[in-house]
Image (cartoon, grey):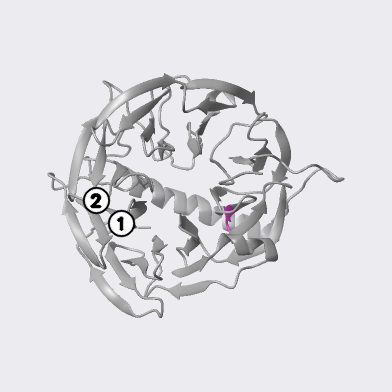
Amino acid sequence: MKQLGKENNVNRRSLRGFTVLTLASLALAACGKETATQPAGAAPAVKEPLAITYDGGIYVLDGESLKVAHTIALPGFNRVNPAGDDSTVVVSTASGFQMLDATTGRMTGVTYPGDKPGHVVRHGDRTILFTDGTGEVNSFDPKDLAAGKPQGRQYKTAQPHHGVAVELADGTMIVTLGTEESRSGAIAVDAGGKEVARNEQCPGVHGEAVAKGDVVALGCEDGVLLFKNGAFTKVKSNRAYSRIGNQAGSDASPILLGDYKIEPDAELEAPEQFSLIDTTTDKITVVPMPKDVSYSFRSLNRGPAGEALILGTDGKLHVVDPATAKITDSWPVVGAWTEPVEWQQPRPALFVRGDTAYVTEPATRKVHRLDLATGKVVASATLEAAPNEISGTLTGR
């Protein structure tokens, strides 16, 4: 997760986060295997479950009522992502990836052990796990989780690094290139594991998104790297340094949403602009946020029609039309907030499922449900502990 030379605030925070996670790993190793606790006795399946991490565990909430259905004790700094089916959430722990059945609030026993579990990517009928500490990539059909650990596809990078992988419908896998010290680009390998394309013109490669037409984008410190029609295309920005490290895509739009940071030496840059990447014209458009408003890496998502969504530090959910690059709505959700320096620390986070947006508010220990058709907050709940990351199943039950 380190880089040679200058680093932006995300990379600096990642290094600190690596230290925190390493210490957590040692503590867990001393205590033994992680355990999950749930209330005794049978309970009805949770509808459209949400998973929200807090310091010491995970809350599982009913996605409609926002009532806490299960509390799972899990020490350390944990992360959550949809597994891609209607019941499972991927939990990244100090010892690797674990699968949580969010409808019952129980760990399934399916694990992918490995040091520093990183990005979880869902595309088409594949879910891809990238383990930074080993360079191992595991790809599987999430529907197979119902029967236990899937018999998926494995790949291993030449060297471990903080990376990401995406698998396309034809079996082509896009995998980042890098070491613990630097990251430079990506390769494409076919279904048999043979390299078919390579590009090393993407310094600091980080993050991924897929646009309409199966176009993959990887973020660089000077633009983005696209993979389309079987080949890589570098799309440069108009600045020497302009990091697009976090992106959000939609099958309904050929235009990707990305962050846009321009201060390579900042301890913590509060970006006041974002990027829209048109994958048909290979053009990056930089759009200003409202005056004095920024956002964090947990602020970006997409709506059901492909609209871009950005949770601003003014507490509003800003809706952007990607085709016109205009902010069309700004809906109040939470109070104004400031991004903490340490990336693991709680800050308002956004999760979108269908026509519903869920937003956490750590300062008040609340979570809110927003109707994306009206912009209205239709439900709110207060948790016992401050929420950190939020995710859930993709389709619910």
* Frontmost residue, 271 versus 247: 247
Above or below, 116 relative to 302: below
Whether residue 84 sits left or right of residue 256 in the image: it is right
Residue situated in front as seen by the camera: 221 or 367 = 367
The image position of residue 4, as x and y in percent, is 26, 59
* Secondary element at image label 1: strand
Residue 54 in the magenta stretch? The answer is no
Q: Name the side, left or right, on which 109 lies relative to 95.
A: right
The magenta stretch is 90-94
Which quadrant would the C terminus be assigned to in this image?
A: top right
> Mark 2 and mark 1: span between their CA atoms?
7 Å
| Residue 265 visible at all | no
Residue located beneath label 2 in the image: 279
What's the mark number on residue 215?
1
Above or below: residue 353 compared with residue 76: above
- Judged left or right of residue 31, residue 329 is left
Closest to the observer: 270 or 390?
390
| Residue at (81, 42) in percent of width and height | 43
The answer to which quarter of the image holds residue 286 is top left
In the foreground, 28 or 358? 358
Q: Position of residue 324 (x, y in %)?
A: 23, 32
Q: Are marks 2 and 1 in contact (CB under 8 Å)?
A: yes
Name the magenta segment's main secondary structure. Answer: strand
Residue 164 found in image quarter: bottom left
Image x and y of residue 241, in percent: 18, 47
Q: How busy is the neighbourhood of tag 2: few (under 14 within 10 Å), some, or many (20 plus)?
A: many
Q: Which quarter of the rendering shows the N terminus?
A: bottom left
**Three-letter amino acid code at disc 2?**
Thr
